[in-house]
Amino acid sequence: MKGAYLKYFGVAIIVLGVFACIPVGFHFGGVLGVAIFLAASCIAGMFFIGFGELVYSLQRIELEIAGERPQYDPLTGQYQVPPKDNGR
């Protein structure tokens, strides 16, 4: 799903920010620069994780309301609706 990619991107931002905060932060102003860069990377990462979770929730709601979307079968040239799984 699309939301999972945003969550992975957010985690990557946080991890790269933690690894890059010391060299980049000291270049921009010592310990305060490290703290600001670390906080900014964590906030940006959490934003993408939260937005990905929101997209994932909206997709689940759409599937509950509208059901599965028809998928195109190139062999027959028609759209086919996948069977609904009631055994959750």
Image (cartoon, rainbow, N blue to C red):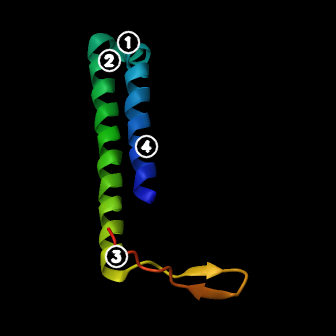
Where's residue 69, x and y in %?
Answer: 47, 79
How many angstroms separate mark 2 from mark 1 (CA)? 6 Å
* Tag 2 near tag 1, CB within 8 Å: yes
Q: Which is nearer the N-term, disc 2 or disc 3?
A: 2
Label ID, residue 35 = none
Residue carrying label 4 = 8
Residue type, numbered disc 2: Val
**Residue picked out by circle 2:** 34
Earlier along the polypeptide chain: callout 2 or callout 1? 1
Question: Is 32 drawn above or below residue 41 in the view shown?
Answer: above
Say which amino acid is labelled 4.
Tyr
38 to 77, vertically: above or below: above
Separation (CA) of disc 2 from disc 3: 52 Å
Quadrant for residue 36, please give it. Answer: top left
Label at residue 86: 3
Q: Quadrant of the N terminus?
A: bottom left
